[in-house]
Amino acid sequence: MLEGIAPALVLIVGLALAFDYINGFHDTANAIATVVSTGVLSARNAILMAGVLNFGGALLGTQVATTIAKGIADSQFVVPAVIVAALLSAIVWNLITWYFGIPSSSSHALVGGLAGAVVAQAGRGALHTAKLEEVGTFLIVSPVVGFFIAMLLIIVILWIVRHTAGHRVNLAFRKLQLVSAGAMAFTHGTNDAQKAMGIIALALITYGKLHTHGVKVDVPVWVKLACATAMGLGTMSGGWKIIRTMGAKIVKLRPIHGFAAETASAIVLFATAHMGIPVSTTHVISGAIMGVGASMNVSAVRWGVAGNIVVAWVLTIPISALLAAGFLKLLAPFF
């Protein structure tokens, strides 16, 4: 698989898997915060479930990986130093936001880092502007879509169960939330693990180890398995600070609300993964949780916490781009 390759390629593969692992524990909360906060599952069991389903979801499809590998910039300008700088930028930003318990976007960090490093290396002309605008639009629109789908879904569900006793509703949705949390975890793996696959595929293309067929990138099986494993293991290591923020600090949830938020998020993530659009699972589930909370009572949402999350959303791309440009300058003498 990796015989006779350059040390820089080994470094890139290692960093991509490290990013994938960090993405797993950084974004664990996306899949399980609501199911933990509603008391349906213990954190331990929820993390184990999410880890297994993240692994399975990571093996489904390569559309997002193709976008990362070929859609962001011209491959000829993506030299090894650019890829390393982008990965270091995304890893550093993920660790900073994890440390402070801020649910930021690994997708934003990676796309911003890659774009920033490419611009620093070859100028803006090296970027695929149209594709970046499409990705950027979906990164902004997807949490809004999650917000309104979740709001509509919870309103419909509450209308359906309006004549049912509260304890029966709670019991039913404690079971149903296992399904919705599982779907969220699976689609999280489908969307997020493919980002690391795309980076490794991009590096393999750069070194002539992988040949593309038109617009499609045939990601090697070993890359899929390695990224799925890293994502699953990262998820199983947990991300307690972000779990607390996502599961309790935005709005207090019951199983019926958790089911609506997770189902809405899974719908958005499955659709965007199918279209090959790398969106933020963090932003989508955050938007869905806010939508559920707003449907109950606008004042039920802790908008101060939500505001901090939005600030992190806005800052992630420019900061990761600047970090990547800085890393590129530091790395240039060694490549």
Image (tube, rainbow, N blue to C red):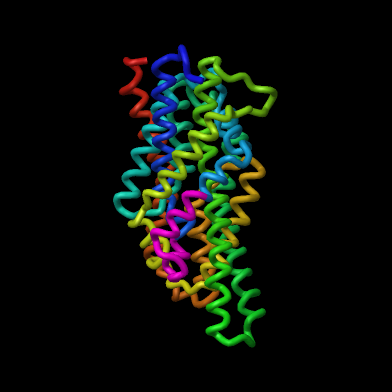
Which quadrant would the C terminus be assigned to in this image? top left
In magenta segment, residue 100 = no
For the point 51% across and 51% down, which residue is it? 281
| Most foreground residue, 129 or 35 | 35
Q: Position of residue 216 (x, y in %)?
A: 67, 28
For the point 48% across and 74% down, which residue is it? 254
* Magenta-drawn segment: 33-52
Q: Position of residue 109 (x, y in %)?
A: 43, 40
Quick check: 143 left or right of 312?
right
- The residue sitting at the right extreme is 214
Q: Position of residue 324 (x, y in %)?
A: 38, 31
Secondary structure mostly seen in magenta is helix
**Is residue 87 depicted above or below 233 in this figure?**
above
In magenta segment, residue 35 = yes
Quick check: 102 left or right of 188?
left
For the point 59% across and 61% down, which residue is it? 264
**Is residue 14 depicted above or below 37 in this figure?**
above
Q: Position of residue 317 (x, y in %)?
A: 44, 41
For the point 68% across and 23% down, which residue is it? 213
Where residue 59 sits, quadrant-wise, is top right
